[in-house]
Image: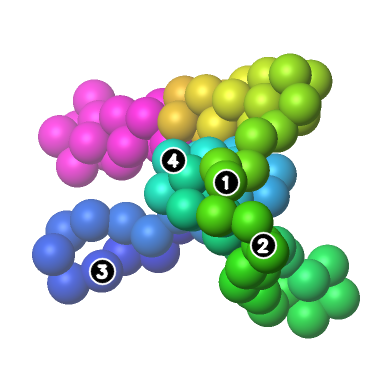
């Protein structure tokens, strides 16, 4: 975690492991036949455009896994934010 000028903190996240890539894809891109993929070697993002304009849908296991990863990341980030606030208030 590192500070920024607005008294906040940057917290490292992993797009794939923290379920953020799943969230971006399922909520914003898949309904429009698009998807972001993460290159595991370069860590760069690629935008995929599907031939069909139909929505892209994950199978149930993949969707559940993505949701669980995202919820765990949110819980971890909320805990980090609470700890940071406690430190600033001397608790």
**Is 54 left or right of 37, judged from the image as shown?**
left
Indicate which label's residue lies in the foreground, 2 or 3.
2
How far is the residue under mark 4 from the one under mark 3?
29 Å
Q: Which residue is mark 4?
A: 27
**What SS does tag 3 mark?**
loop
Regarding residue 83, the answer to whether it shows in the image is no
Q: Which residue is mark 1?
A: 54
Q: Are marks 4 and 3 in contact (CB under 8 Å)?
A: no
**Is 46 left or right of 85, judged from the image as shown?**
right
Residue 90 is one of the magenta-drawn residues: yes
How far is the residue under mark 1 from the one under mark 4?
14 Å
Q: Which residue is mark 3?
A: 4
In the displayed structure, 6 sits above or below 89; it is: below
| Mark 4 or mark 3, earlier in chain | 3
Q: Quadrant of the N terminus?
A: bottom left
Regarding residue 55, the answer to whether it shows in the image is yes
Residue 54 is one of the magenta-drawn residues: no
Indicate which label's residue lies in the foreground, 1 or 4.
1
Q: What span is colored magenta in the figure? A: 77-91
Indicate which label's residue lies in the foreground, 4 or 3.
4
């Amino acid at each position: 975690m590192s500070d920024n000028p607005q008294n906040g903190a940057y917290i490292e996240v992993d797009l794939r492991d923290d379920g953020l890539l799943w969230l971006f894809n399922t909520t914003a891109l898949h309904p429009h036949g698009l998807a972001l993929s993460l290159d595991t070697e370069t860590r760069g993002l690629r935008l995929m455009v599907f031939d069909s304009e139909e929505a892209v849908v994950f199978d149930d296991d993949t969707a559940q896994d993505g949701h669980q990863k995202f919820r765990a990341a949110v819980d971890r980030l909320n805990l980090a934010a609470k700890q940071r606030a406690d430190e600033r208030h001397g608790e």
